[in-house]
Amino acid sequence: MNAYKAYIRSEKWANKRKARKQLDQFKCVRCGCSDGRLEVHHKTYDHFMDEPLEELETLCVPCHDIETDRMHRKRYLTQWEQMEIEYEQREVKAPLIAKTKSLMPEVVGHKDERTRI
C-alpha cells in the first residue's frame, strides 16, 4: 500500500476529516448541500499528512468530482501548454523567424543584434 492510501485510511486522517466537517457544519462549502456523502478535499498537498484544517474543505461528491477534475485539468493543461510552446518554438517559430529574417532587409547601421530583423 502506498503512503497516500495508508494515510487516507489512518485514524489521524479520520480525525481531521471529522474536524473539518464539523467546522463546515456538515455542509458542502460549494453548494451548501448536506444530503448524501460528504468528502474532505485537500485544496493543496503542500503539507500532506500534516495539513492544517485551513487547507481542507468539505465537499459533496458532485462538487468534489468537479474540483478534482478542475485541478487535474489545470495541472495537465499547464504541462500540455508547455509542451505546445516548446513544439511551436522548435517547429514553427524558429523556421518562420529565420525565413522572415532572410526576406527582410537589415536595419542599416544598427549595432544591437537583438533588434535586427
Image (spheres, helix red, strand yellow):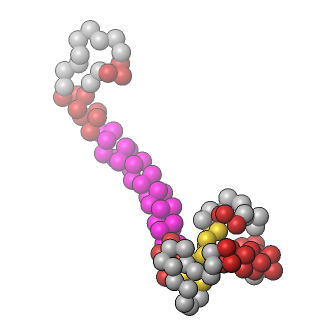
Q: Quadrant of the C terminus?
A: top left
Question: Is 11 on the left or on the right of 98, as rendered?
Answer: right
The one nearer the camera, 92 or 114, is 114
Mark yes or no: residue 33 visible. Answer: yes
The image position of residue 23, as x and y in percent, is: 67, 73
Q: Position of residue 90 (x, y in %)?
A: 38, 44
Residue 105 inside the magenta-drawn segment:
no
Judge whether residue 72 is colored magenta.
yes
The image quadrant of residue 110 is top left
Nearest the camera: 25 or 10?
Answer: 25
Q: Is residue 91 left or right of residue 30?
A: left
Of 93 and 81, nearer the camera is: 81
- Furthest toward the top, the residue is 109
The number of callouts visible is 0
Quadrant placement of the N terminus: bottom right
Q: Residue furthest right?
A: 11
Name the side, left or right, on which 10 lies relative to 68. Answer: right
Q: Residue at x 54, y 82 (%)?
A: 60
Tell me: residue 58, above or below residue 106. below
Give above or below for 106 relative to 71. above
Region in magenta: 68-95
Of all residues, the one furthest to the front in this rendering is: 25
**Residue 42 placement (x, y as % from top left):** 63, 69
Look at 72% across and 63% down and name the residue there.
Answer: 52
Q: Nearer the viewer, residue 42 or 82?
A: 42
Q: Main secondary structure of the magenta part?
A: helix
Give the percent coordinates (x, y) of residue 21.
66, 78
* Residue at (62% x, 62% y) in the render: 44
Residue 17 in sight: no
Residue at x 19% of width, y 21% of height: 105
